[in-house]
Each structure stands twice: as structure tokens, then as C-alpha cells.
Amino acid sequence: AQSVTQLDSQVPVFEEAPVELRCNYSSSVSVYLFWYVQYPNQGLQLLLKYLSGSTLVKGINGFEAEFNKSQTSFHLRKPSVHISDTAEYFCAVGKGTNAGKSTFGDGTTLTVKP
Amino acid sequence: DAMVIQNPRYQVTQFGKPVTLSCSQTLNHNVMYWYQQKSSQAPKLLFHYYDKDFNNEADTPDNFQSRRPNTSFCFLDIRSPGLGDAAMYLCATSSPGQGSTEAFFGQGTRLTVV
């Protein structure tokens, strides 16, 4: 069985500050890892994904994440946030190639303040 | 450019009155999913179609049904909506057979039950 824990339910940060959203997972098999962003009343949009290879993954909107197998973590980072980054962020772990059957974390609300 | 389209974006239905939510896709993906997302919670997979094969999650209530008449369209039917069924419903697609390792989401339908 797989599970995902997003360690912070809410993260407030000032504009242009760096941010890290934390995600830990558990799985008995190799996994695919994803970060999605959800703006109010919108669907989920993929930010980035880790499948294999380089542990540092770069995504859209200046986000990046680092896969750490020993710590079973996949933390999302951005060096300088904008007001427009205010949204809900979901970490997800997929098993095999059926990506839509991913297990999602409970989400982290990122609020960027001016 | 819209790839996964959900209609309507907002739906109000009466308690106990059957309602159907619609999803269409232009990606020609063979897998389509329906998720339920309640306020401030992670998306929860209800079921998915792999081609014509229907796959129900074990804890999906019988009140929820789905139809997929062709590759492009998938419907979510709620036979007798209760107040607890008020949520955002997300449709997603993927194509594992084509090496796609991510799911593409629609913008969701927000269902209100009155």
C-alpha cells in the first residue's frame, strides 16, 4: 500500500521569499512522484514529476523538487514566490504506469502575502 | 487548446434528484477517471475506465455510476444525491499504453445539493 503525508497543511510566506512544501511517502515498490497545483475552483495542473534518473526535477512556474529515496521525501521548492503562486498544492505517488490511480496527500495551502 | 473538458462547471441539484456530470477529452487517452474532492481534502478516486473496462474503487458508494459510450466521453451519474455528495468532481485522463506517466485533469464540476 502507498501513502502520502504532506507535513504542512498551511504555509504562509511573503512575496519574493523562498518556500518549501514538504512531502513524505511510503511505498513498498518503485514509485512515480508528482506535484500538482490547484487554484480555487479549478482542476489539478501538473507542476512536475519524478519517474527515474536525476533526483532534482524542474517543473513549471519556477518550481523544483528533490527526490530523496533514503528519506522517502519529495519536497517542493521555489526560490522566490509570487502572489500568483497562492494555491493548493498536492503531492501524489503513483504505482506503475496507471498515473490516474495515484494516492494524493491532503494538500498544502500556500498563501503568498505582499 | 482545452484537452479535458467538464460540463457544467457548476451544478445545483435537489436532494434525491438524479444528476449527470459530463467529461470529454481530445487527447485520445484510453483511461478516464472520476474523482470526488470535498472541501479542503485530497481528491478521492471513485472509479476509472481502462478502454471499455470499468474499474470501481472498493469504497465507492452504489449511488455513483459511470458510463463511457466512446473514447472521448465519460459520464458520472449520481442516482440519488445526498447533502454529503456536495463536492468538486474531477475528471482526468491518462494513456499508460502510450508511455504517458501523468494524468490530465479537467477544471472540475462543483456540485451543490439543496
Image (spheres, coloured by chain):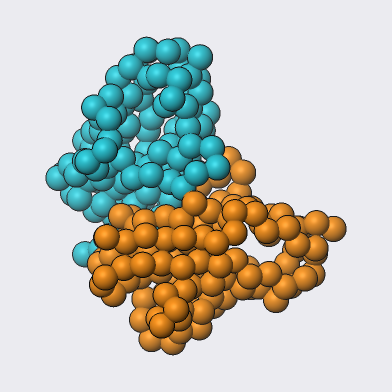
Residue B98: horizontal and vertical position, in percent? Answer: 25, 67
Report the side of B3 relative to A62 (left or right).
left
Above-or-below relation of A101 to A75: above
Toward the viewer: B47 or B23?
B47
Q: Is residue A24 left or right of residue A7?
A: left
Residue appearing at x 38%, y 29% in the figure: B21
Q: Quadrant of residue A18?
A: bottom right
In the rendered image, the residue lying farthest to the bottom is: A54
B2 left or right of B28 in image: right
Res B73 visible: no
In the rendered image, the quadrant that contains the N terminus of chain A is bottom left
Q: Residue furthest left?
A: B53
Any idea which chain is the cyan one in this picture?
A: B
The residue lying at 29 percent from left, 47 percent from top is B32
Q: Quadrant of the C terminus of chain A?
A: bottom right
The residue that appears at 26% across and 72% down in the rendered structure is A29
Identify which residue is drawn at 34% across, 52% down.
B93
x then y, percent, for residue A36:
50, 59
* Residue B69 image position (x, y, % from top left): 21, 35
Q: Is residue B104 visible?
A: yes
Chain (orange): A
Residue A5 drawn above or below residue B109:
below
Position of residue B60 measured from the top left corner of the image (x, y, whole percent): 27, 35
Q: Which is nearer the eye, B63 or A71?
A: A71
Q: Is residue B89 above or below residue A65?
A: above
Report the number of numbered marks: 0
User: Farthest residue in the right direction?
Assistant: A114
In the image, residue A52 sits, relative to residue B80, either above or below, namely: below
